[in-house]
Amino acid sequence: MGAWASRGRAARVPATEAESEPEEALDLSQLPPELLLVVLSHVPPRTLLGRCRQVCRGWRALVDGQALWLLILARDPSATGRALLHLARSCQSPARNARPCPLGRFCARRPIGRNLIRNPCGQEGLRKWMVQHGGDGWVVEENRTTVPGAPSQTCFVTSFSWCRKKQVLDLEEEGLWPELLDSGRIEICVSDWWGARHDSGCMYRLLVQLLDANQTVLDKFSAVPDPIPQWNNNACLHVTHVFSNIKMGVRFVSFEHWGQDTQFWAGHYGARVTNSSVIVRVHLS
């Protein structure tokens, strides 16, 4: 009975246990630099740049240097990871005015292999796009045909006059650095999906340009496919292109497409575009 009666009451702890000394916090700054690098390499890159860099001058020097980021890159055992590590070592940026190593932004932004286009399917309305409205303008609707791999089954829909929208991607801002862009070891893959609604034909155009720091065109790809006719069973087509052997000096990618319907109906019966992408990849050979 005594055991049941004591349930719910706070247990009494001997004073020697309750008043035991707290453990002394570990001061990482006392570690040798080589060991501190190993510890910091397990911290997420964004935390390294946003918080650890503010701790002290010593930590800032480690975060701004190359050794920490090379250690982080070396942890990826995949073929792409090994290629990236080799490129990071061979395409190092020269020290200029004690600027932070560009590998920090590269590791934080992870620009290789991800879509650099923002809001590719209209899941955020028209945000991130520079738009020119024709006819009744752009709207966002649900897809009539499933687009594989799309982050959202929605699309941008055009009207009875040419509707146009555009994004210009700053490759350095995305985490790539000039020596890597000029290395000849990367390629830029672009793609776009476009289609029609069953009861209306449509027209579509695509223009992708590689630009230098002054926005001068160094290379381009354009697509002007044949219009999709009316009564098309909700046709959906895929346009792709790979820029390889990229010229030196490329710093921006301009991605621009247009659409309209062929019936000239009021409303939104024109080309439906979605899942636009610009992806930078590394040559593995």
Image (tube, rainbow, N blue to C red):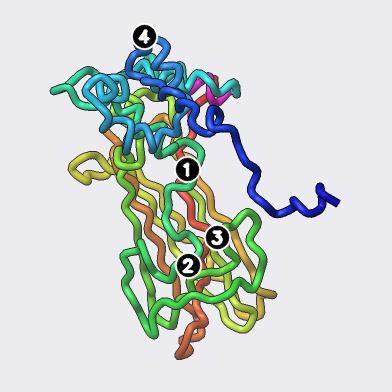
**Quick check: can you spot residue 176?**
no
Disc sitting over residue 279 in the figure: 1
**Quick check: can you spot residue 108?**
yes
> At which x and y percent is residue 167?
34, 57
Query: Which element type, helix, strand or loop, lies under badge 4?
Result: loop
Query: Which element type, helix, strand or loop, lies under badge 3?
Result: strand
* Marks 1 and 2, how far apart at CA: 18 Å
Label 3, on which residue?
A: 193
Q: Main secondary structure of the magenta part?
A: helix
Q: Earlier in the sequence, mark 4 or mark 1?
A: 4
Q: Nearer the viewer, mark 2 or mark 3?
A: 2
> At which x and y percent is residue 86?
45, 16
Amino acid of disc 1: Ile
Residue stretch rendered in magenta on the structure: 79-84
Query: Which element type, helix, strand or loop, lies under badge 2?
Result: loop
Amino acid of disc 4: Pro
* Marks 2 and 3, how far apart at CA: 13 Å
- Of all residues, the one furthest to the right in this rendering is 1
Q: Earlier in the sequence, mark 3 or mark 4?
A: 4
* Marks 4 and 1, how far apart at CA: 40 Å
Q: In this view, does 203 lie to the left or right of 130?
A: right
Q: Which of marks 1 and 2 is nearer the N terminus?
A: 2
Q: Residue at x 53, y 32 (%)?
A: 15
Amino acid of disc 3: Trp
Mark 4 in CB contact with mark 1 (< 8 angstroms): no
Disc sitting over residue 122 in the figure: 2
Disc sitting over residue 32 in the figure: 4
Q: Nearer the viewer, mark 2 or mark 4?
A: 4
Q: Is residue 273 left or right of residue 45?
A: right
